[in-house]
Amino acid sequence: QCDGSSDVCSSDLMRPLSDGLLDFVVMYAPEARPGFQIEKLMDESLVMVATRKGHAGPGEPDYVLVDWGPDFDAWHSDQFPQYGMPGLHVSLGALGLRHILSHGGAGYFPARVVAPEVANASLFPVRGAPTFVRPAHVIYPSESESDVRAAALASLKAAAAADAGDLA
């Protein structure tokens, strides 16, 4: 699964998929190409969390802006037009999360990833912060169906459905 700019990830993953080195890939913004099937896998919710209660979000100097791709950037700019540059801008969500857990701060991260930290009170949802929903898709060759790929896709879809059920 790509983390960051979907343009880079899409091209990086499509080549091995086209070459038959991968059976399928999961992408947030798949590019429709002839010979490939795209199915929505799940909706990923990005939520703003902070290491302290009462964090004000993007206006604070310890806010970390993660590059979740162009759709998120546009949405974030629309939601928070009054704020300019964040305290820190990172390309990888895992890096941003590690930073705020080590040094304090806030940022947007997948709800399913931060759920354990919220449950143990290491992170707190930022009150009133909007949620960004981005659909995740699975893409695979339309032809050359195999039993192994079918079983793996079924398992992936079941895991995604169970994960979504845990967040409800």
Image (cartoon, rainbow, N blue to C red):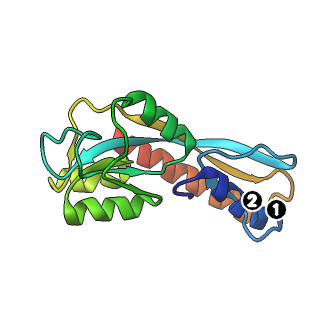
Q: Is residue 151 left or right of residue 98?
A: right
Q: Provide residue 101's location: percent of width, then percent of height.
A: 23, 62
Count residues near mark 1 (Cα–Cα under 10 Å), then give few for <14, some for 14-19, many for 20+: some
Residue at 63 percent of width and 44 percent of height: 29
Count every numbered label the image shows and give the total: 2
Residue pictured at 67% horizontal, 42% vertical = 39
Q: Position of residue 143 (x, y in %)?
A: 86, 54
Instruction: Identify the element where label 2 is drawn.
Output: helix
Left-right relation of 159 to 22:
left
Q: Amino acid at mark 1?
A: Ser
Q: Decide if residue 101 is on the left or right side of residue 167.
A: left
The quadrant in which the C terminus is found is top left
Q: Position of residue 79 (x, y in %)?
A: 39, 29
- Kindly state the secondary structure of the residue where label 1 is placed: helix
The residue carrying mark 1 is 18
Give residue 160's position: percent from left, percent from top. Answer: 50, 49
Q: Nearer the viewer, residue 41 or 32?
A: 32
Q: Is the residue marked by circle 2 packed among few (<14), some (14-19), or many (20+) residues within 10 Å?
A: some
Q: Which residue is mark 2?
A: 14
Instruction: Identify whether 130 is placed above or below 146.
Output: above
Task: Indicate the quadrant containing the N terminus: top left, top right, bottom left or bottom right.
Answer: bottom right
- Determine the residue positioned at 18% across, 53% down: 51
